Amino acid sequence: MPGFEIFGDEERKEVNEVLETGVLFRYGFEGARKGRFKALEFEKKLADITGTGFAHLCSSGTAALCTALAACGIGAGDEVIIPGFTFVATFEAVIQAGAVPVFGEIDETLCLNPDRLEDVVSSRTRAVVPVHMCGSMARIDEIKDFCDKKELILLEDACQSLGATYKGKALGSFGLAGCFSFDAVKTVTCGEGGGIITSDPKVYQRCDQFADHGHDHLGGPDRGADDHPIMGTNYRISELNAAVGLAQLKKLDKIVEIQRKNKLAIRDAMADLPGVSFRYVPDPFGDSATFLSFMLPDEKTARQTARNLAENGAPCPYWYDNNWHYYKKWHHLLEMKRSAKLAFELAKDLPDYKNLVLEESDEVMKRTLSMQIMLNWTEADIEQRIRAVQKSIC
Ligand SMILES: *Cc1c(COP(=O)(O)O)cnc(C)c1O
């Protein structure tokens, strides 16, 4: 998963090109910047790779989600269906929009279960935000069908799944907009950064404006001459960050290729282990292979296996207990702890978060472990992982 494993001369070269000009700002400074627009170049490449017409970079994946929600017109009191297995940023962004996160169940894809959306949809539901967790996909075509039928906005959180596809189409490109993160531990990193992709010129325009104080970017060389058709904020990326990301993005195919090879070697070796099953991946050819997620028969075995794996030098996250990725430990959300009143309290009938129980999600997550797939593993490292897994599962 982490692009930082393969930093090299390419990243240094891109960064130095920015430093040589002294222009760290993505807009303006036409004379000084010598035609270097790293953020713009990154955006073109991202739009190109994902087959969408447009991409816009932000200062983080979280900022990208906030921007995309705003650009899609999601706001106060709107309900947004999200999974209980994701990074906290997904619900943070919904709350930031003044909207209400409503939690749907996941299935063995470890992503939103399309068959359970009907249970949580209401007359206030505006959008569904599936999260393509751990490098692989939700049953995205079925989720899209549901959204189309109900006239809901589909916005994909693909922050963990750059480079993954479903039936040849990039994750993030199925709905009105899709978001990526380029934070320090993601597949492609630029330190801090995020991106939105969309095929809708209007949504793109709103992203471009919202993330830069509403600037329409039509005023020419004088930024002060720009108009501000909507209110926005500052979620801009710097040229330095974009430069790192640009070099990394050029390595994406290579990254995914290595991950797939490493994952396959371990998966094959695990195939006959008793009681082990694997995460359901709707299109195995499109898996970006950042993680190998597998299930044990029950919670007790999963916990014991997690302990064994750690002792044997191959620790694997047990997300069910994770503070940041599973709803059970989100006490701040469940108890609505915050520093100030939030806009969405204006909305009536908030969900009873305190008593939130996602039974089917728990059933899956209790039994699931994920091994992170690294790029720099040698053959010997992979062999060691395989031995550790064989020793740990009994
Ligand atoms: C990393 C991540 C984000 C947020 O990205 P940042 O760049 O860290 O703000 C959002 N959603 C998911 C699923 C993530 O993994």
Image: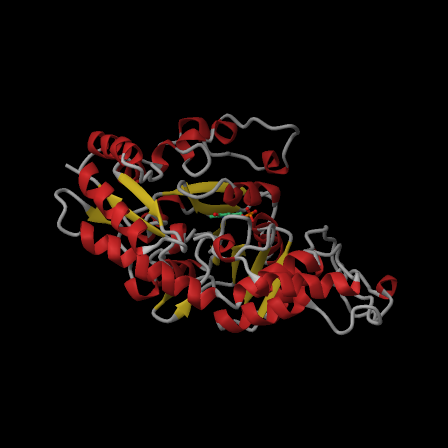
- Where is residue 59 drawn, in percent x and y? 64, 52
Which of the pair 216/196 is nearer the observer?
196
Which of the pair 338/184 is nearer the observer?
184
- Where is residue 347 drawn, in percent x and y? 57, 37
Left or right: 126 as drawn, with respect to 301: right
Which of the pair 164/91 is nearer the observer?
164
- Which residue is painted at 31% across and 57% down in the image? 262
Describe the colour scheme in one phrase.
secondary structure
- Which residue is painted at 41% across and 37% down in the image? 326
Query: Seen from this angle, which residue lies furthest front?
Result: 380
Left or right: 169 as drawn, with respect to 205: left
- Inspect this view and state whether residue 138 appears: yes
Left or right: 137 as drawn, with respect to 175: left
Task: Report which quarter residue 304 is drawn in.
Answer: top left
Task: Report which quarter residue 348 is drawn in.
Answer: top right
- Inspect this view and state whether residue 199 appears: no
Left or right: 172 as drawn, with respect to 227: left
Q: Is residue 70 above or below residue 88?
A: below
Task: Report which quarter residue 268 is drawn in.
Answer: bottom left
- Where is residue 394 drawn, in percent x and y? 14, 36
Which of the pair 93/274 is nearer the observer?
274
Number of marks in the image?
0
- Where is residue 300 drawn, in percent x and y? 21, 29
Q: Is residue 305 above or below residue 120?
A: above
